[in-house]
Image (tube, coloured by chain):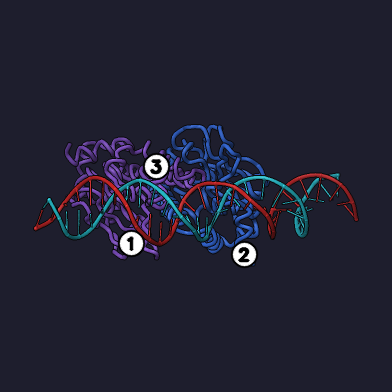
Chain colours: A purple, B blue, C red, D cyan
DNA sequence: GTCATAATGTGACTTAGGTCACATAGCTAC
DNA sequence: GTAGCTATGTGACCTAAGTCACATTATGAC
C-alpha cells in the first residue's frame, strides 16, 4: 500500500477529513527510508519531528548512567514515535529513537503539526484523540508494571504484538519489560 | 479564589479563549463538594465524567485480585482525574476515584467535552495539550519505574509534590510507588 | 478523658529478580 | 570454511523488596 493510503486509513479511524483536507494534511509529511540500526533521534539532539511508521519497526529508548537500556516503545506500522517530551517542550532529547529493522516513516515537524492543527479543526481533533489513546495505553502499562510480574508482562506483550517475537531480539524485549535478559531467558525454564 | 477563576487561569496556560468563549466553556462544568473518603468512580461503574480539582485531593487507583491497591494518580488542585480508559472507550470502570480529603471539583461530562471541542476549536486545542502533557508525564513515570529504585522514586515524588507528605498517609504513597508500606517505612532506617 | 481504629515501625524470614561468569549456538564477512 | 560477532541459555550467588507477625503511636468518636 502507498504511504498516503496507509496514513489516510489511520487518520480516518479518529477523525473525518474530506479528501481535499486530507490532501492538505498529507502534504506536510515527508517520507524517509531508513536502514536497520539507523539512529533517528539521539540523546542530546534538538527534536524537530515526530515519525509515523509505514513499515518496519522503530524503538524509542533511554540509556541510564550505568549504560543500561530501557525501551519506552516499539513502534510498528501505523504507530508514532518521537521524544515527545523534547518535541513538545523544545528541550534536548533524553530519549533516543532508532531502527530495529529497515523502516519507512512519514516525518512531521512540530511546527507543521501545530500549523495543521491551527488551520484544520479536524486535524486537531485527530491529534487530540491520538494522544488520548496513547495516554490510556501508557497508564495501562504503568499499572501492569505495578501489578504484574515479569512473566505476565511478557505474555501480555506477546499477546498484544505477536509479531514482535520474530522481529525483535529477546534482549530488547527484556529492556522493554524492564528486566535483565537473563531473567527473561529463564522464564520458561523447566 | 472562585471556581471559575481557577479554571480560567488553568485553561489560559494552554489555550487563548476570549471571555465569551470561556463563559461558554465554563457553563458546561458542574461544581461538586465532596467529603473525605467519598467515592466518585467505583470499579464497575459507567463512567460519564472527568473531574477538575479546585481544592483538596483525589486519588485514582486500581485494586487487584489480591485486594492490593495501586495508585495511578494523586489529583491536586488544577489536576484532572477520571478513569480515562472507561471514559473514552465507554467501558465500565476498572479504576476507582475517591477523595483523600474534603474536595471540591468541577465535573465535565464526556458528551459535553466533545460538544465543546466540536464547537470551539480553542477548547479542542486546550484538551489536546492537556493530554499531551499527561502523556509525557506518564512516560516519565514509566521510565522512573524501570530505571529507579524505591528510594529515588520516593524522593522524586516528594520533590514534585511536597504537599503530599503532609496530606497523604504513607501507605498511600507506597501504593503510588508500587511497593509495600513496610518497604517505604524502612527506607530511612538507620 | 478513654476506647477503638488507623497509621506506622520493625524483626524474621522468603522470594523474585539482578549480576557475573561461562557455555553454546547462529549469523556474517571474507 | 573459519574467524568473529551477536544472541541466547544457564549455573551460582547476591540483594532488594515482599510477607507475616507483632509492637507502638496517632487520631478520632463518644
Q: Earlier in the sequence, mark 3 or mark 1?
A: 1
Q: Is residue C22 left or right of residue B63?
A: left
**Quarter in which the C terminus of chain B is drawn:** bottom right
- Does residue B66 lie above or below B152 as drawn? above
Q: What is the distance, in whole Å, between disc 3 and disc 1 at their CAs? A: 23 Å
Dividing the picture into quarters, in which one does residue A165 lie?
Answer: top left
Front residue of B175/D27: it is B175
Q: Crowdedness of circle 1 by 10 Å Cα count: few (<14), some, many (20+)?
A: many
Which residue is rendered at x = 58% and y = 38% of the image? B41
Q: Are marks 3 and 1 on the same chain?
A: yes
- Residue at the spot x=44%, y=34% of the render? B89
For disc 3, the chain is A
Label 2, residues with CA under 10 Å away: few <14, some 14-19, many ≥20: few
Mark 2 highlights which residue? Answer: B188
| Contact check, label 3 and label 1, Cβ < 8 Å | no
Q: Nearer the viewer, mark 1 or mark 2?
A: 2
Q: Which residue in the protein does label 3 denote? A: A133
Amino acid at each position: 500500500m502507498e504511504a498516503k493510503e496507509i496514513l489516510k486509513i489511520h487518520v480516518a479511524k479518529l477523525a473525518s477529513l474530506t479528501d481535499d483536507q486530507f490532501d492538505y494534511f498529507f502534504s506536510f509529511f515527508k517520507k524517509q527510508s531508513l536502514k536497520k540500526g539507523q539512529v533517528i533521534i539521539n540523546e542530546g539532539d534538538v527534536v524537530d519531528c515526530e515519525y509515523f511508521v509505514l513499515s518496519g519497526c522503530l524503538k524509542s529508548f533511554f540509556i541510564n548512567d550505568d549504560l543500561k537500556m530501557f525501551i519506552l516503545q516499539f513502534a510498528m506500522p501505523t504507530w508514532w514515535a518521537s521524544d515527545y517530551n523534547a518535541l513538545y517542550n523544545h528541550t534536548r532529547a533524553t530519549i533516543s529513537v532508532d531502527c530495529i529493522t529497515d523502516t519507512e516513516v512519514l516525518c512531521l515537524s512540530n511546527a507543521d503539526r501545530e500549523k495543521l492543527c491551527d488551520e484544520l479543526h479536524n486535524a486537531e481533533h485527530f491529534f487530540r484523540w491520538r494522544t488520548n489513546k496513547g495516554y490510556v495505553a501508557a497508564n495501562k502499562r504503568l499499572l501492569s508494571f505495578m501489578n504484574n510480574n515479569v512473566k505476565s508482562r511478557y505474555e501480555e506483550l506477546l499477546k498484544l504484538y505477536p509479531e514482535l517475537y520474530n522481529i525483535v531480539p529477546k534482549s530488547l524485549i527484556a529492556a522493554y519489560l524492564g528486566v535483565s535478559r537473563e531473567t527473561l531467558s529463564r522464564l520458561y525454564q523447566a
